[in-house]
Image: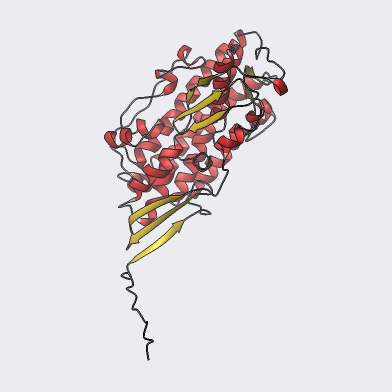
Amino acid sequence: MRPENYKSVEHPPSHEYELNFGPNHPGIEGNYALKVKLEGDVVTEAKADGGYLHRGFEKLMETRLWMQNIALVPRICVPDPVPMEVVYSLGVEELGGLEVPARAQWLRVLHLELSRIAAHLFTFGGHAATTGMYSNMFWGVTDRDYVLDLFEQMSGGRVYHMYNVPGGVRRDLPDGFLARVSELLDYLERRLPQYDDLFFANAVFIDRARGTGTLTQEQALSWGVTGPNLRACGLSFDVRRDDPYLVYDQLEFDIPTETAGDALARTLVRRAELIQSIRILRQVIARLPGIDGPIRCPLPNPLAWNVPMGEAYPRVESSKGELCFYLVSTGGDRPHRVHVRGPSSMHAVQVLERLSIGTRIEDVAQTMFSLDACPPEVDR
């Protein structure tokens, strides 16, 4: 017999259910979660769920000396840490009135473009794996390791380098380094046709990626989309060209675009960007030997460096999109306020949530990888 206070429970139809992608899932870019509701195998609702990785960067930076933060900022985006070092250094240099030597500026561009190549190779491998192409994943990770070898020779670190510091860079290049970079670029150019056969021109990938996670230009602008995801909608905007920093205004390179705005277009833009990074690096290799001089300007004692009062808002073009730091100094030995405005904060939350709706369950991970978000930057 049922108790007097018994209440019947209305169960949802059996074809509606919830599913968690992450925080530990091979189809998610790191420790990140996307909670989805499905009707059959189609997503009807998606909710981003972060906070599983590095958190509180901005407040941590406000408790550390200006120079100490160089060891912290690369961790905001592990696959592409160099732009974090550079944009922070640009902000401190603006506040402190520091003039970075010419050679250091060219070395920073060398470092940035190598990091862009490494990040794109990593993304190609992960995206391919979401469509079952695991060979391309192994290729991408292995070829990225060749870039990490160069980072180790350049800075002593493979993933976190702490190479770019306010005022310039920590050290000059080791002997024979430019020749080794040139050899790597030759290798990647020979490798690209193989990537095309296996991945970019693969009929299975094209069929899966075309029409998946489509963004219109209006949506991209309204939702704060930047970088390759914006250029895949046909909008040719790149901070390196449109608001130049370092020596990018002295270099020749194109801004690749596509028009479809889907997962395929976003991937093809990144493939074309890799070619442009090779083009930029060849110019750096040709011109750097003739640029002599110091690699950093004189700095005060880092343990007692009171940066002048003011505000700075530098921005750079990372592999993920437009990256900005807002720095406030009250004239003390550490930042008063720090705010990171990175591309992943938009791409991995409001954009991913919206694009996932209507997507089949097998394409949720592909949509995320095509947006190329960086989870620790969301958790910052």
Vertical arrangement, residue 249 with respect to residue 334, above or below:
above
Q: Quadrant of the N terminus?
A: bottom left
**For residue 166, which quarter of the picture?**
top right
Q: Nearer the viewer, residue 96 or 364?
A: 96
Q: Position of residue 358 (x, y in %)?
A: 30, 52
Q: Nearer the viewer, residue 169 or 287?
A: 169
Tell whether 203 sits left or right of 332: left
Is residue 232 visible in the rendered structure shown here? yes
**For residue 80, which quarter of the picture?**
top right
Q: Residue at x 67, y 21 (%)?
A: 170
Q: How is the image coloured?
A: secondary structure
Q: Position of residue 346 (x, y in %)?
A: 41, 38
Vertical arrangement, residue 207 with respect to residue 246, above or below:
below
Tally the marks. 0
Q: Residue at x 51, y 14 (%)?
A: 247
Q: Residue at x 30, y 70 (%)?
A: 13
Is residue 187 visible in the rendered structure shown here? no
Vertical arrangement, residue 361 with respect to residue 366, above or below:
below
Tell whether 243 sits left or right of 291: left
Q: Position of residue 210 (x, y in %)?
A: 32, 44
Q: Position of residue 5 (x, y in %)?
A: 37, 82
Tell whether 375 sits left or right of 175: left
